[in-house]
Structures are given as C-alpha cells and as structure tokens.
Image: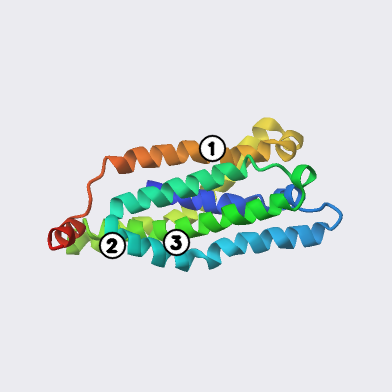
Amino acid sequence: SAGALFEWYDFYIFGSLASILAVKFFEKGHPVAAFLSTVAIFSVGFLIRPLGAFLFGWVGDKVGRKYTFIVTLSGMGIATALIGFVPPYTSIGLAAAFILFGLRLIQGLCLGGEYGGAITYVAEHIEDEHRGYYTGWLQTSPTLGIVLSLGTIIGIRTYLGVEAFNDWGWRLPFIISLLLVAIAIWIRLSLDETPVFKEMKAKG
C-alpha cells in the first residue's frame, strides 16, 4: 500500500502542477494552448496504463510479482524525479515538451503495472476470508496519493514563498519522489515472493 501510495503521488504531482508546467515547458505566448498541451500530456499517462498492466502482468507471470513491481516502482520514481531536472522551454525549446511527454509515458506504463501487480501480490498472500479486506487497502492509495501530492506542494510553497516556488521550488515535489521510492523499495526488498508464484515456478 505504501508503494502504491507513492506511485499515485508521483502520478498526480504532474496534474497538481499543470499550470506551472505549462509555463515552464511550452511557449508563453499562447498560455491557453500551453495549458491544454500540459493537460493532454497528463492524460496520456492514463491512456497508456492498460498497456503497462498487460506488459508488466506478463512479466510478473514470467519472473515473479515481487521483482516486477520493484521495477515498476523504480521506473516511476526515476521518471518522476527526472521531470524535476528537465530544462525549461526557454533553454531547449520544444525538446522540453518531448522529454516531458516521454517521461509521462514511462509514468503511465509503470503505474499500470504497479497497481495490478500490487493487488495480485497481496491477493496471492492472503487467505480467502481476508482477501477483500487487505486488497481494499490498496484501493485507498489513489485518493491518498492526491492528498499527499497536494500537501507536499502546499507545504513547500508555504515554506519557500510563491515567487520562489514558481521560479524553481516546483521542482522539489518531483525530486522528493526519489526519497519516497527508496523507502518503498527498501520495504519491498524485505518481502517474499508469493506462494502462488512459487508453486507455479515449481511446476515449471
């Protein structure tokens, strides 16, 4: 649940800062077009999720649930952090938007694999009478991810001030993702593979 929460934080921090990203990564002469372009890139992350679910679901059946969602968690964290380092439109032109688009694709793919993978992992560990309860915890992660992203933004903006936040501080919520993902990976590395997958592997 912690890993899923951090992944949703990574996913939603993009949308929460859409108005700033529009200014930073698109031409300022057309603010409405820039904002709509940012929203379109945000939406791509949702549209690509089913492909991530199929791709990483297949990988999960081949190499295991545990290592697959460590890969998805790492991919999401790195892609999110890299958004915080992308040079603005004024430095590299349209390349900034293309890089942003590519990183957003990675986010969507990884979230698609993470969410289904985490539910599968939990479901394959829990006995029948408690399966719904424990997988239910994972369903809270999207909402809590939004809350965490907004809370982080408000906290940093309050501390730095609006001007500094709009200038460079907006990058910090993305970069903080590295710390959150490191915590989640540390937790997940201590977990075992699921009994169901072990049985599948033993049968070849």
Task: Name the residue beneath numbered marker 3.
Answer: 112
Residue 83, image x, y percentages: 61, 45
Residue 175 seen in render: yes
Local crowd size for mark 1, using a 10 Å CA cut-off: few (<14), some (14–19), many (≥20):
some
Amino acid carrying label 1: it is: Ile
Task: Name the residue beneath numbered marker 2.
Answer: 61
Which one is in front, 164 or 190? 190
Task: Name the residue beneath numbered marker 1.
Answer: 176
Residue 145, image x, y percentages: 49, 51
Residue 80, image x, y percentages: 55, 46
Counting residues from the start of the chain, the first of labels 1 and 2 encountered is: 2
Local crowd size for mark 3, using a 10 Å CA cut-off: few (<14), some (14–19), many (≥20):
many
| Distance from Cα at disc 3 to Cα at disc 2 | 15 Å
Residue 26, image x, y percentages: 76, 53
Local crowd size for mark 2, using a 10 Å CA cut-off: few (<14), some (14–19), many (≥20):
few
Q: Are marks 3 and 2 in contact (CB under 8 Å)?
A: no
